Amino acid sequence: MTSQRTLNRLFVLHSWAGIVTGLLMFIVCFSGAVVVFKNEIDLWANPSLAGLPRTEPPAPLATVLAQLQAHYPGATVETIALPDATNPSYFAHVRERGAPASQRTKVALRSDTGAVMGPVDSQLGQYLRMLHVSLFFGPRWIVGFLGAAMLVLIGTGIVIHRKILAELFTQRWGRSFRVVMSDLHKSAGIWGLGFHVLIAATGAWLGLAPLFEQGYKYVMAGAPAASAARKPPPAAEPAAMQSLDTLYRSAQQAVPGLQARYVSLRRWGTTAAEASFTGTLSGHLASTARVDMNATTGEPKKALDPRTAGFWSLVNGLMEPLHFGDFGGLALKWLYFILGMTPAFLSISGTLIWLDSRQQRRREAQQQAGVPPGLQA
């Protein structure tokens, strides 16, 4: 049985954790609920793309790359996104000659012919994802920290509100504002409890796991010595490239069932060229399968198959689809959207409850001090 003193301390921790993180928590949760429709939002924001034909199978990757190189001579093609269940088109990120590394153009291409349609008009869906993942300005661990804070709020809330079953159906509409909001706050938190734990845990993992992994590698390997400073890569000479389609088939042989979503090109056209195929696995939820191919020899350089890379690699591969709900079609997205709005509501209602409680305590203190009601704040 938890003592009243412990409950009071947990209540203070719950309250202040919510107040300190409330605004950022609302932004992350609201944007996260909306971003499940990222691809649909991008199509809505670019109506000219929604009417393009969907071709199965789509145009060869080699054709797409050739069209890009012809339309943007001298530019660097960095990534190509393949058509999927929502987007009927190819997309590519192109950096034109002389442009800084951060300045890229997103280009749409037809899936039937690979013909370049031109730069997309809007990247609203991608901007929403950037807001959710990194708040535009910060590293991903900031959002991971908010996921950990959300787990603290869930844990303390469960201990504080011990009569969970009774509070599932408690809503006293005729009472004061604080009582109404408190009932809504508790019932919303309880009804969405399982989903909230899932979102908080996966968000904390996605944001913080890379940070801990880097720290672990640094500790185990030791600080790099000055003499072991990075050496510049060897000069790369022009070379003939293997076809992207041939490389893709080889990648699928290296990782059976690979369904690439993105192709990343590095140092294309030189002896050091690489093509990386990243995507999902057929019949599996993991979303981090990847194969790095030597683009001159057509041989795999590195392959990551979450099914065979160990337990933690498999867990990591499951985190993103579980967090964004992009594996169950439109019905699951709507479920994620509805349930994803409840943490945003909880951050608002929790703040309003705290402010109302603070104002009530101020009134009580003024009454005890003999301040006339008309002069009370």
Image: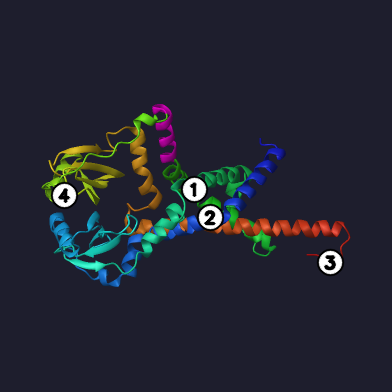
- Mark nearer the N terminus (1 vs 4): 1
Circles 1 and 2: CB atoms closer than 8 Å = yes
Circles 3 and 2: CB atoms closer than 8 Å = no
How much space separates mark 3 and mark 2, taking CA atoms?
Answer: 36 Å
Could you tell whether 115 is left or right of 145 in the image?
left
Q: Give yes or no for residue 219 being in the magenta stretch.
A: yes
Could you tell whether 20 is left or right of 372 in the image?
left
How much space separates mark 4 and mark 2, taking CA atoms?
Answer: 44 Å
Residue bearing the label numbered 3: 373
How much space separates mark 3 and mark 1, taking CA atoms?
Answer: 45 Å
Residue bearing the label numbered 1: 142
Q: Residue furthest right?
A: 370
Disc number placed over residue 269 in the picture, else none: 4
Q: Give yes or no for residue 343 being in the magenta stretch.
A: no
Which amino acid is tagged 4?
Gly
- Secondary structure, mark 3, is helix
Looking at the magenta stretch, what is its main secondary structure?
Answer: helix
- Mark nearer the N terminus (4 vs 3): 4
Circles 4 and 2: CB atoms closer than 8 Å = no
The residue carrying pointer 1 sits among few (fewer than 14), some (14 to 19) or many (20 or more) residues within 10 Å by Cα, namely: some
Q: What stretch is highlighted in magenta?
A: 209-222
- Which quadrant: the N terminus? top right
At which x and y percent is residue 152? 56, 43
User: Where is 108 relative to 212, above or below?
Assistant: below
At which x and y percent is residue 363? 79, 60
At which x and y percent is residue 332? 37, 56
- Mark 3 or 2, closer to the camera: 2
- Which quadrant: the C terminus? bottom right
Q: Quadrant of residue 271?
A: top left
Residue bearing the label numbered 2: 24
Q: Which residue is drawn at 43% across and 52% down?
A: 133
At which x and y percent is residue 51? 24, 71
